[in-house]
Image (cartoon, grey):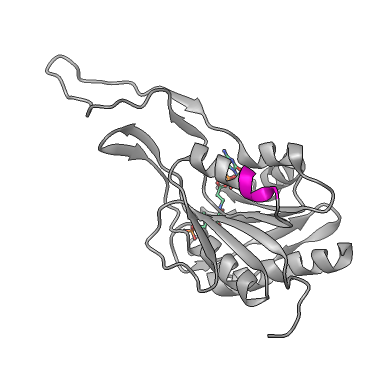
């Protein structure tokens, strides 16, 4: 294949929804199918990048030529990302990461009892992976985040771009039909610190991945 700005670049992509255990038979998760992240991994691999896909559980097949690192919880994902990021040029965080996890995860199945009509599950914050990465990121490394929003898309996403020291932020308004979790389509706005927002049309996740990777590729070309 022809040489591209991404040829030989080491890229870490995350995908899927993390799972936080409550007890041996129950967990908390979200609607992420992994499709968006897998489409990005596929596109990057086809442009010559060396792709490591760190994936929470999904029903998808690993794209050809991509190295899979399977994870389950947010803390697993955090440590896999921190390790892989050490020798990476680019990180793309498409995974839907749990913001909270059960304060305690118990070894035995939680029982229903006759005298309890209610139960309270205490949750604590998980590690913010992109904020952790921001602390060790060098000027040669590029980080790409996503923002799944249901209101004030651009305001909330711009805040994430800044707070997580990202080079690109892919914002999707997941309250809109055909956008975000689970389906085969998406519509995103690509934010960058030094550029006007780029709003894509509603299209297949494969086509959205191409447009996202086009922007990553352009930044790599400019900076390299
Ligand atoms: O998997 P699909 O079904 O194809 O759906 C695609 C998608 C909707 C999951 C994807 O397009 C998407 O938006 N992924 C990010 C979901 C998310 O966790 O967004 P957020 O706005 O809560 O988080 C912002 C960013 O911080 C994300 O890049 C996230 O990976 C990251 N994050 C979040 C929490 C945390 N503890 N650590 C993080 O690094």
Q: Quadrant of residue 187?
A: bottom right
Residue 143 placement (x, y as % from top left): 72, 52
Residue 83 magenta: yes
Q: Quadrant of residue 42?
A: bottom right
Residue located 62% across and 40% down the image:
129
Q: Is residue 36 above or below residue 125?
A: below
Classify residue 75 as left or right of residue 50: left
Q: Quadrant of residue 4?
A: bottom right
Residue 25 placement (x, y as % from top left): 25, 38
Q: Nearer the viewer, residue 117 or 34?
A: 34
Residue located 67% across and 76% down the image:
47
Q: Which image quarter is the N terminus in?
A: bottom right
Residue located 63% across and 62% down the image:
188
Residue located 40% across and 53% down the image:
57
Residue 151 can be seen, yes or no = no
Give the total number of marks visible in the rendering: 0
Classify residue 74 as left or right of residue 118: right
Q: Main secondary structure of the magenta part?
A: helix
Classify residue 98 as left or right of residue 145: left
Residue 30 can be seen, yes or no = yes
Q: Is residue 202 above or below residue 93?
A: below
Residue 132 placement (x, y as % from top left): 67, 36
Residue 44 placement (x, y as % from top left): 64, 70
Q: Which image quarter is the C terminus in?
A: bottom right
| Stretch in magenta | 82-86
Outermost top residue: 115
Q: Nearer the viewer, residue 127 or 194?
A: 127
């Amino acid at each position: 294949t022809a040489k591209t700005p991404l040829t030989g670049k080491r890229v870490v992509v995350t995908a899927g929804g993390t799972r936080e255990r409550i007890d041996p038979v129950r967990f908390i998760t979200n609607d992420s199918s992994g499709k968006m992240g897998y489409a990005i991994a596929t596109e990057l691999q086809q442009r010559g990048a060396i792709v490591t896909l760190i994936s929470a559980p999904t029903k998808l097949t690993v794209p050809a030529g991509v190295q899979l690192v399977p994870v389950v919880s947010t803390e697993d994902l955090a440590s896999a990302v921190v390790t892989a990021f050490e020798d990476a040029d680019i990180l793309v965080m498409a995974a839907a990461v749990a913001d909270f996890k059960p304060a305690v995860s118990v070894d035995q199945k939680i029982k229903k009892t006759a005298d309890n009509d209610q139960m309270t599950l205490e949750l604590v914050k998980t590690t913010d992976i992109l904020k952790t990465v921001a602390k060790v990121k060098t000027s040669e490394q590029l980080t790409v985040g996503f923002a799944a929003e249901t209101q004030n898309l651009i305001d909330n996403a711009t805040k994430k771009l800044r707070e997580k020291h990202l080079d690109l932020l892919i914002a999707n308004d997941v309250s809109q039909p055909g956008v975000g979790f689970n389906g085969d389509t998406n519509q995103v706005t690509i934010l960058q610190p030094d550029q006007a927002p780029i709003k894509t049309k509603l299209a297949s996740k494969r086509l959205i991945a191409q447009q996202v990777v086009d922007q990553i590729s352009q930044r790599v070309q400019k900076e390299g």
